[in-house]
Amino acid sequence: MAFQHFSAPSRASSAVPRPTARSGVVHVNNRHTTRYTVVGNHLAQHRELSLLAIGLAVHIQSLPVGALVGIKFLSSRFPESEHRIAGALRELEAHGYLKRTRERLPGGKVVTRTVSYNQPGSAVTAAPEPVHTPQQPRKPPPATQKPTPGPEEPAAPAPAPRPVPRQALPQPRTLDLERHRTATALLAELHRHEPGLLLSERDVHRLAPATAAWLERGASPDAVRRTLTARLPEPLKHPAALLAHRLTALLPAPLPTAVVRPALRPDPFQTCESCERAFRAPEPGYCRDCRTDRRGRLA
């Protein structure tokens, strides 16, 4: 008769844990020792951020210092478009997980500085550089070393950008009320063809003379509409400024003017000194018949 071993399990345990609830997720957690990022539940379970913004924040927090996080670079790295990535970055900025500032370098180049916060409201500190001599190789700081928190130093204000002078819009040579009404209606209805080109009443009145200048130069309303709505940038932030630029930079050449020759005035009427017949001549004298008779008699 075999002895029973009460300390041995009655059956082999499964690698998949048994669910402790009737429904929902079951976690299989393994302890990470390398290549991991700590993310707080305030971010992972944020109720106001979109899933794209949460995932983008986790990706940015996992990157090393100096990694590229521009919109064009992220759109080339992930399947989302530039428009969606830009919206997610704005969400992270609004909730304090990201801060982007534009700074001008000593050489004049303007760059964007991006600061990622794993905890909104935390201060930005820099790790001290280790002192080394040329004879001794520079040693990296140990993995457990962390920068000590300190007061946040105010950043130097960036120089204000120079104002760009607004280019004067083209004006028609002659005032035509019917042409001006056509230009106004064309601008007011652009949003029906492109929803992003919704103009205010003030912008319509400001751009109407420039549009009338195009019509004056022989451009049809359909041709003007196609030029103004072709290949719009995404996202379209300033539709009125874009239309003003296109109306100015793409203005067609004026139509050639027809050469009008002055009409020749006929000679005034004269009275013949012989027969008193009226005839046209630059100076008083004899009519054609009397001149012929006089030449015959003299001959």
Image (cartoon, rainbow, N blue to C red):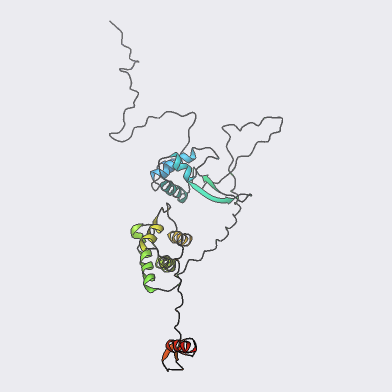
Q: Is residue 130 left or right of residue 33?
A: right
Q: Is residue 158 left or right of residue 206?
A: right
At 39% across and 67% down in the image, what residue appears?
A: 201
Residue 175 at what x, y percent from top left? Answer: 42, 74
Q: Nearer the viewer, residue 222 or 208?
A: 222
Q: Is residue 134 left or right of residue 27?
A: right
Q: Is residue 88 above or below residue 130?
A: below
Q: Nearer the viewer, residue 91 or 44?
A: 91
Q: How many numbered discs?
A: 0
Q: Is residue 191 above or below residue 135?
A: below
Q: Is residue 286 above or below residue 214?
A: below
Q: Nearer the viewer, residue 98 or 261?
A: 261
Residue 7 at what x, y percent from top left? Answer: 35, 15
Residue 72 at what x, y percent from top left? Answer: 47, 44
Quadrant of the frame with the N terminus: top left
> Furthest residue to the front?
299
Q: Nearer the viewer, residue 199 or 78?
A: 199
> Which corner quadrant of the image does residue 270 belong to?
bottom left
> Which corner quadrant of the image does residue 127 belong to?
top right
Residue 93 at what x, y percent from top left? Answer: 47, 49
> Furthest residue to the top?
1
At 49% across and 47% down in the image, what residue appears?
A: 98
